[in-house]
């Protein structure tokens, strides 16, 4: 209901259409105008999924409009499919459907399907707004050219490459010399192009020096086109640009405004829709979310990357995390930069999050022990107030809590890093013990941790372990503690990186203030601005943040 008959096709009818296209190769007589081709072209056998439009993909067996849209969206994110097996990563395509599609598709241009219908708008690109109807072939970047109806990223890159080698185009008809553009394609794109040279799109000059492949660069408004200005927040400060993009790069990146590139990368970096909107309450009882996240060599160099900052800040905000235990902090300034982004956002996606109270703070060990550990916390919101209890204020906690902290301070080991911190949640004390295990715990270290847990149980203090225990064997050493999360849950994105994140409460979970709701964040952790080896679109950390809810009654 609500669908046209043409959109509901059986598997046999789809195959018959594909068979018709193949058979037409043997018969070169003129067909209807819909399927007519230039005389020099023939119908190939397979469909190239790197250049096919959404409508063409829908002619494949088992491919609906929604699935075709997912294929196009995934292709935009990765650039192109290198092999047919890469389609298995597209949402909605499983092993069975991939095998159904395999005989029908290819990923190279040698056997690419080419019909007149391919002249329809390329859905790989964002459409040009009414403010700027014509795009200059002599000064526009790849990102701007691929917004032209009829051009995809590959053709846009070919245009820029040809322009860099041969010089500016003297006529729009010269585009026929560009690889991949035929007379039909040219007639489609010409109404949207001009030959104008615009100074605002001149090459960005980069100064020497970089941080993690990114350089902080302030831009004048003259470098920003009108479309991007309309999207940018007035609070935006300076952004950063990858110095891996040379000044004269044939793909056209160097001629694009820096902020435009970052806005585009951010727009095409997936942000998940959180299934449940947490409102700091569960079954009528006020609660908050406590989390642990190994941010894997968190340094100033790393945080300078805007993709890393955006992923960290948006994840914290989207899941309404009140306190986050951070592991593997290389420099104090890196945590300070995250706090500054949360409190005074410069990135558009962080700025536009409306439920940010901008009252974030961080803390690190004052004695230098466990210096790679720290905490990020939201000081106050209308539901829960969080106050850090410093060493100078430890007189407000009980004698038992002070003894526990002294016991933790007495543990000295290169294999076990500990950072205890007392927080007051609505004036109720909670001891959070941030942990990072570098190796298998010794018997003495295990006994010390069990002793700390026993002291908390005896004195009825709220104490919990948060952090990276490296393996479940280290967790099992704490026999008087229980994991809040299911032990079968995988807490890392990269199985080759050793680590096992966990949240442990002393005693049993049912007898603690944890309400049993916990989870692992596995989506929205990658960004197209983060390097992944020799490509882009990597994660902010190979480890996932984990969280658990703690009841905080009034």
Image (cartoon, rainbow, N blue to C red):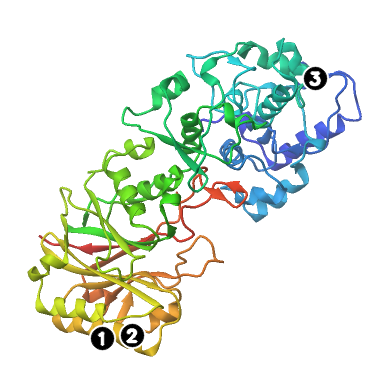
Left or right, residue 535 beside residue 468: right
Mark 2, mark 1: which one is toward the viewer?
Answer: 1
Contact check, label 2 and label 1, Cβ < 8 Å? no
Q: Is residue 273 above or below residue 8?
A: below
Q: CA distance from mark 1 to mark 3?
A: 81 Å
Where does the image place residue 457, in percent across and percent down from the top left? 19, 81
Instruction: Write down the residue under mark 1.
Output: 451
> Which circle's residue, 2 or 1, is located before the other in the chain?
1
Q: Residues within 10 Å of mark 3 (few under 14, many from 20)?
A: some
Question: Which image quadrant: the C terminus?
Answer: bottom left
User: Can residue 128 be seen from the camera position used here?
Assistant: no
The number of callouts visible is 3
Most distant residue in the front direction: 208
Residue identifier under label 3 = 36
Q: Does any portion of residue 307 appear in the rendered image?
A: yes
Q: Secondary structure at mark 1?
A: helix
Please state which of residues 116 and 395 is positioned toward the viewer in this rendering: 395
Q: For mark 2, give the secondary structure.
A: loop
Q: Look at discs 1 and 3 and give the one toward the viewer.
A: 1
């Amino acid at each position: 209901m609500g669908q046209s008959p043409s959109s509901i096709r059986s598997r046999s009818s789809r195959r018959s259409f594909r068979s018709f296209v193949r058979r037409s190769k043997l018969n070169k007589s003129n067909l209807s105008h819909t399927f007519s081709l230039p005389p020099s072209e023939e119908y190939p056998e397979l469909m190239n999924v790197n250049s096919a439009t959404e409508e063409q993909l829908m002619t494949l067996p088992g491919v609906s409009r929604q699935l075709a849209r997912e294929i196009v969206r995934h292709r935009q994110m990765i650039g192109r499919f290198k092999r047919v097996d890469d389609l298995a990563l597209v949402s909605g395509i499983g092993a069975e459907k991939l095998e159904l599609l395999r005989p029908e598709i290819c990923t190279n241009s040698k056997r690419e399907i080419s019909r007149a219908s391919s002249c329809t708008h390329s859905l790989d690109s964002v459409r040009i707004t009414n403010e700027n109807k014509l795009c200059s072939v002599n000064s526009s970047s790849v990102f701007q050219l691929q917004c032209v109806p009829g051009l995809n990223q590959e053709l846009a890159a070919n245009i820029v490459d040809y322009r860099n080698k041969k010089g500016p185009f003297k006529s729009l008809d010269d585009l026929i010399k560009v690889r991949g553009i035929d007379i039909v394609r040219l007639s489609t794109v010409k109404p949207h192009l001009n030959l104008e040279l615009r100074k605002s799109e001149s090459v960005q000059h980069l100064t020497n020096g970089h941080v993690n492949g990114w350089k902080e660069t302030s831009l004048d408004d003259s470098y920003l086109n009108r479309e991007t200005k309309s999207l940018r927040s007035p609070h935006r400060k300076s952004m950063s640009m990858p110095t891996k993009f040379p000044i004269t790069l044939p793909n056209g990146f160097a001629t694009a405004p820096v902020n435009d590139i970052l806005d585009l990368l951010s727009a095409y970096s997936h942000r998940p829709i959180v299934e449940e909107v947490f409102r700091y309450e569960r079954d009528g009882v006020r609660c908050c979310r406590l989390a642990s996240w190994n941010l894997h060599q968190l340094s100033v160099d790393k945080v300078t990357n805007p993709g890393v900052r955006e992923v960290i800040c948006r994840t914290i905000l989207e899941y309404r995390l009140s306190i986050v235990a951070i592991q593997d902090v290389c420099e104090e300034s890196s945590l300070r930069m995250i706090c500054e982004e949360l409190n005074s956002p410069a990135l558009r996606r962080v700025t536009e999050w409306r439920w940010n109270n901008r009252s974030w703070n961080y803390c690190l060990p004052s004695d230098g022990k466990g210096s790679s550990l720290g905490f990020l916390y939201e000081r106050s919101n209308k539901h829960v107030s969080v106050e850090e209890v410093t060493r100078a204020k430890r007189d407000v906690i009980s004698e038992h809590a002070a003894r526990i902290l002294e016991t933790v301070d007495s543990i000295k080991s290169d294999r076990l890093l500990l950072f205890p911190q007392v927080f007051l949640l609505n004036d109720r004390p909670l001891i959070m013990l941030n942990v990072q295990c570098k190796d298998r715990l010794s018997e003495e270290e295990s006994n010390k941790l069990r002793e700390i847990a026993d002291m908390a149980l005896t004195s009825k203090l709220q104490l919990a372990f948060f952090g990276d225990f490296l393996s479940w064997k280290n967790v099992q050493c704490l026999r008087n503690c229980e994991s809040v999360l299911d032990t079968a849950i995988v807490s890392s994105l990269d199985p080759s990186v050793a680590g096992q994140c966990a949240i442990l409460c002393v005693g049993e979970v049912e007898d603690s203030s944890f309400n049993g709701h916990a989870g692992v964040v596995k989506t929205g952790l990658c960004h197209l601005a983060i390097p992944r080896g020799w490509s882009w679109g990597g994660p902010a950390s190979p480890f996932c943040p984990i969280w658990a809810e703690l009841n905080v009654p009034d």
